[in-house]
Amino acid sequence: MTYPLVSELADAGIPVSVSCRVLKLARQPYYRWRGDPIRDADVLRAYRINALHDAHHDDPTFGYRYLA
């Protein structure tokens, strides 16, 4: 996702409009993304996905049935 990059560039003093134009992004979805807080359900889902990836990385013989 390139929106965090736009935020970092904005913190460095580069206008959002310039960053979005160079990266070929629309500004309105960026501002919507910035204004929308991350929900707890999204964080929990990300932790679960990372745990599944880590378990599979530790032992590749674990299939999807075992991990589910």
Image (tube, rainbow, N blue to C red):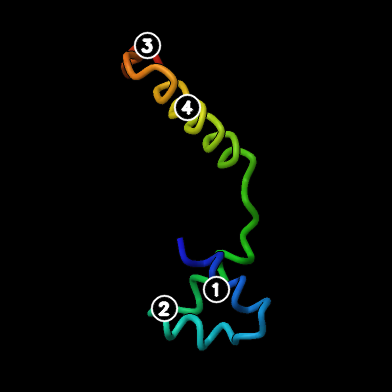
Image mark for residue 23: 2
Assess whether mark 4 and mark 2 are in contact (beta carbons under 8 angstroms): no
**Tag 3 secondary structure:** helix
- Amino acid under label 4? Asp
Assess whether mark 1 and mark 2 are in contact (beta carbons under 8 angstroms): yes
- Amino acid under label 1? Val
- Camera-side residue: 38 or 23? 23
Among numbered discs 2 and 3, the one appearing first in the sequence: 2
**Tag 1 secondary structure:** helix
Which quadrant of the rendered structure holds the N terminus? bottom left
Pointer 3 residue: 66
Among numbered discs 3 and 1, the one appearing first in the sequence: 1
Residue farthest to the top?
A: 66
Q: CA distance from mark 4 to mark 3?
A: 14 Å
Mark 3, Cα crowd under 10 Å, few <14 / some 14-19 / many 20+, is few
Mark closer to the observer (4, 3): 4
Pointer 1 residue: 6
- Amino acid under label 3? Tyr
Image height check: is 60 above or below 7? above
Q: Can you give x and y, in whole percent of width and height, for residue 40 in the image?
A: 64, 40
Question: Which quadrant of the view contains residue 35?
Answer: bottom right
Among numbered discs 2 and 1, the one appearing first in the sequence: 1
Image mark for residue 54: 4
Among numbered discs 4 and 3, the one appearing first in the sequence: 4
Q: Can you give x and y, in whole percent of width and height, for residue 55 in the image?
A: 46, 21
Left or right: residue 21 versus residue 4 is left
- Amino acid under label 2? Leu
Q: CA distance from mark 3 to mark 1?
A: 40 Å
